[in-house]
Amino acid sequence: MNKRMISLLRKNRRTVIGLLSGTSVDAIDAVLLQITGNGINSIIKVIDFTELAIPQQVRLAIFKNSDIKTARIEEITRLNVITGALFSDAVLKLLKRNNINAASVDLIGSHGQTIHHLPEKDNYIGYRVKSTLQIGDPAIIANLTGITTVGDFRIADCAVDGDGAPLVPYLDHILFTHKSKNRALLNIGGIANITVLKKNARKQDVFAFDTGPGNMIIDGLMYHLFKKKYDRNSQAAKKGILNTELFNYLLNDSAYKAEPPKSTGREHYGMEFQKKILNKFKKLNKFDTIRTITEFTAYAIWYNYKNYIESDCKIDELIVSGGGANNPLLMQSLKNYFKGAQVNKLKLNGITAQNKEAILFAVLANECIAGNPTNMNRVTGSTRDVILGKICQAL
Ligand SMILES: Nc1ncnc2c1ncn2[C@@H]1O[C@H](COP(=O)(O)OP(=O)(O)O)[C@@H](O)[C@H]1O
Ligand SMILES: [Mg+2]
């Protein structure tokens, strides 16, 4: 092992960059922070956060190659390198903004870009495995930035029969467990996931799962109907009214109703799901369509709380993060459903609705270096603890 790795291992305080592009494929989120210690004793100091927009042609290529009907192996192979280079650009942007060089950063933790997520153990050539694939290879990032990079966090959990998702409950547990309040943390990215933290929760008490759609259906239909990336400040939804027929059609969806543990992604709520809606409800007013999808998205979250959480843990506070926290109608709809609880957008010690998921990957990288297991068996369905992440060294 080289000297640089040995000194990295010995440090108690590390400067770390966290990188993420979620299922929305809107932008690469990049956060710069200092982490002191590790595990439950980690102390985090957020220094800066920035986003690097993903070029639309790359975004569309990722959508195309996430879909079994249109994916092509040579495109995925190239996208692995292209997105790796984009992640590196996000790092360089962050360094420049902060007037620092690569040598002053100890570590990068990168989620990559999910291209396919297969948590169901369907029979395939006589094998039944859980699997997931993230591209934007950490070896590309390490070599283009000159910073040791940990990536590919999810697959180690699949090795022990876990879904590899969600991973955010680990961070939620170490940062947000409260002495006297039952809390739930809701992240509304492309997909929505919820973490339930009973007061004084221990690691094994933490319960979390993907509830169903986050912004994915709204974004998809905004693109098809308005050629926009998303419904900025609910402008379209606010012009429409709820359509009962479409709402009832959506209620029949199986994924949001399924019992946890569960995880979902673009495989379910992506292009195919969206095209079915468009075909069936061609004549519906476009604004009503977006309004109804927005209301359904909030309903699907609440349905999961009512059916799978409330009897075990009545929450006092719902803390919302992810881009969906910026959608005012979605937030209002959640407030209407979660009447008994305080519903707030995340803002705590520099951690915000925008930067939280990127912080997760910085923390997971730090835990990987420390040798701490970060999968949560009750959450992913895995059979034992494993260390998540692959370490790529830079010269
Ligand atoms: N001002 C806003 N109004 C409405 N929706 C927003 C706003 N800002 C962000 N979003 C939503 O958040 C999404 C991005 O969320 P993000 O948390 O980055 O998701 P992911 O983790 O899947 O990348 C956008 O595509 C959009 O749907
Ligand atoms: Mg995003």
Image (cartoon, rainbow, N blue to C red):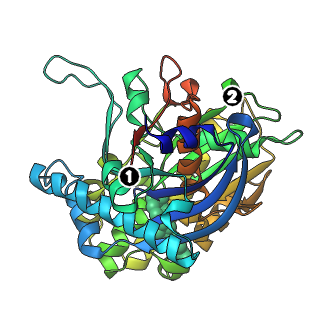
Residue 353 at x, y percent in the picture: 63, 63
Question: What's the amino acid at mark 1?
Answer: Gly
- Nearer to the camera, 327 or 15: 15
Element under label 1?
strand
Q: CA distance from mark 1 to mark 2?
A: 26 Å
Q: Is residue 202 above or below residue 208?
A: above
In the picture provided, is 36 more to the left or to the right than 392?
right
Please name the residue shown 44% across and 70% down the image: 92
Residue 345 at x, y percent in the picture: 70, 63
In the picture provided, is 173 more to the left or to the right than 30?
right
- Nearer to the camera, 248 or 272: 272
Say whether disc 1 or disc 2 marks the residue closer to the N-terminus. Answer: 1
Q: Is residue 355 above or below residue 150?
A: below
Mark 2 closeness class: few <14, some 14–19, many ≥20 residues within 10 Å: some
Residue 200 at x, y percent in the picture: 82, 33
In the picture of the structure, the residue carrying the numbered disc 2 is 203
- Nearer to the camera, 129 or 309: 129
- From this viewpoint, is residue 69 visible? yes
Q: Is residue 119 above or below residue 210?
A: above
Please name the residue shown 17% across and 24% down the image: 124
Which mark is on residue 112?
1
Residue 223 at x, y percent in the picture: 32, 74
Please name the residue shown 30% across and 66% down the image: 281
Please name the residue shown 50% across and 29% down the image: 387
Question: What's the amino acid at mark 2?
Answer: Lys
Element under label 2?
helix
Task: Look at the numbered discs 1 and 2 and tell me whether their residues touch, using CB distance below 8 Å.
Answer: no
